[in-house]
């Protein structure tokens, strides 16, 4: 059975002292493994503070080249060096504000896997997309183009409707389940039973009050949480709700 997992996305928030305090406060209270994707500048501090606990650390982006003259960029090796095990790839804010394309996302997925980082591949449709399912399926297929069936168990996919991010509006659990069920089916057609291994998350205005509604859905294996992941108590509540749903306690 797939486990349920909560992944926080701090976005451009958190300075070192607060990040250290968060890890110290949160890690001992977690009932199951959780991940925080933090800004590059606090990854070291967070990894150090979370060492030996079930709080894992991730980044929010990386460049697909291994090294070289790419001023301002961060490589997979650099992320590993500061203790990150996960990396968000293709978040809609990167696509929207930084022009990240499907091809960039595909390269980043490949580089992450090659280096032993777990990519959290984001997909989701903007408001007023005419055929949301087709749109999101195409994004996912493009992102996983070079991936093999064996690699699927090292990939997390987050479905985040763009209109639900940071707006306080969520997709209904039924709509999220329907979309994620279809995405899993697409992977089944391509990869067979290996698609059952992929963890699919819902993201977009998830918080400690609404998370359980999503976690009880068959195909939803967790949540990618922005705003509500900044508060230590909310984060612990969400993670422990996930543990409860799948009897991990
Ligand atoms: P939100 O962000 O929870 O603040 O809506 C989710 C995300 O962007 O991953």
Image: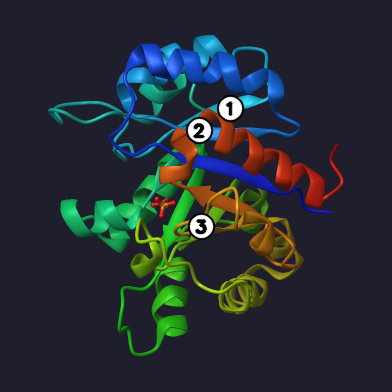
Query: Circle 1: is it few (<14), some (14-19), or many (20+) Cα within 10 Å?
Result: many
- Element at badge 2? strand
Q: Is mark 3 within 8 Å of ligand 1?
A: yes
| Eye-nearest disc, 2 or 3 | 2
Closest to the observer: 13 or 66? 13
Residue at image location 47% in from the left, 76% down from the top: 137
Marks 3 and 1 in Cβ contact (< 8 Å): no
Q: Where is residue 10 in the image (x, y as percent from the top left)?
A: 39, 36
Of the two numbered discs 2 and 1 on the same chain, state the one appearing first in sequence: 2
Label of residue 197 in the image: none
Query: Circle 3: is it few (<14), some (14-19), or many (20+) Cα within 10 Å?
Result: many
Query: Circle 2: is it few (<14), some (14-19), or many (20+) Cα within 10 Å?
Result: many
Of the two numbered discs 2 and 3 on the same chain, state the one appearing first in sequence: 2
Label of residue 56 in the image: 1
Marks 2 and 1 in Cβ contact (< 8 Å): yes
Q: Where is residue 86 in the image (x, y as percent from the top left)?
A: 51, 35
Q: Distance between the residues labelled 2 and 3?
A: 14 Å
Q: Does the residue labelled 2 lie within 8 Å of ligand 1?
A: no
Marks 2 and 3 in Cβ contact (< 8 Å): no
Q: 84 above or below 100?
A: above
- Element at badge 1? strand
Residue at image location 43% in from the left, 57% down from the top: 122
Q: How is the image coloured?
A: rainbow
Closest to the observer: 144 or 55? 55
Judged from this view, the residue extending furthest toward the bottom is 130
Label of residue 36 in the image: 2
Say whether residue 62 is visible.
Answer: yes
Q: Position of residue 171 (x, y in %)?
A: 50, 72
- Element at badge 3? strand
Label of residue 158 in the image: 3
Of the two numbered discs 3 and 1 on the same chain, state the one appearing first in sequence: 1
Q: Quadrant of residue 239?
A: top right
């Amino acid at each position: 059975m797939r486990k349920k997992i909560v992944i926080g996305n701090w976005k451009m928030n958190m300075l070192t002292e607060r990040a250290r305090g968060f890890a110290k406060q949160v890690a001992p209270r977690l009932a199951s493994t959780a991940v925080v994707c933090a800004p590059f500048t606090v990854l070291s501090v967070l990894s150090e503070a979370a060492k030996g606990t079930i709080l894992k650390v991730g980044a929010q982006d990386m460049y697909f080249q291994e090294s070289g003259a790419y001023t301002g960029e961060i490589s997979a090796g650099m992320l590993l060096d500061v203790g990150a095990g996960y990396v968000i790839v293709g978040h809609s804010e990167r696509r929207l504000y930084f022009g990240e394309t499907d091809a960039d996302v595909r390269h980043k997925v490949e580089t992450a896997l090659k280096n032993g980082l777990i990519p959290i591949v984001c997909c989701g449709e903007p408001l007023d997309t005419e055929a949301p399912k087709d749109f999101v399926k195409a994004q996912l297929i493009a992102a996983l183009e070079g991936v093999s069936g064996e690699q699927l168990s090292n990939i997390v996919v987050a479905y985040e409707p763009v209109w639900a991010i940071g707006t306080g509006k969520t997709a209904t659990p039924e709509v999220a389940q329907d979309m994620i069920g279809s995405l899993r089916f697409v992977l089944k057609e391509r990869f067979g039973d290996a698609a059952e291994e992929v963890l699919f998350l819902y993201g977009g205005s998830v918080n400690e009050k609404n998370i359980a509604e999503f976690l009880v859905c068959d195909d939803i294996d967790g949540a990618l949480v922005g705003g509500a992941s900044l508060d230590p108590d909310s984060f612990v509540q969400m993670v422990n709700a996930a543990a409860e749903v799948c009897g991990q306690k």
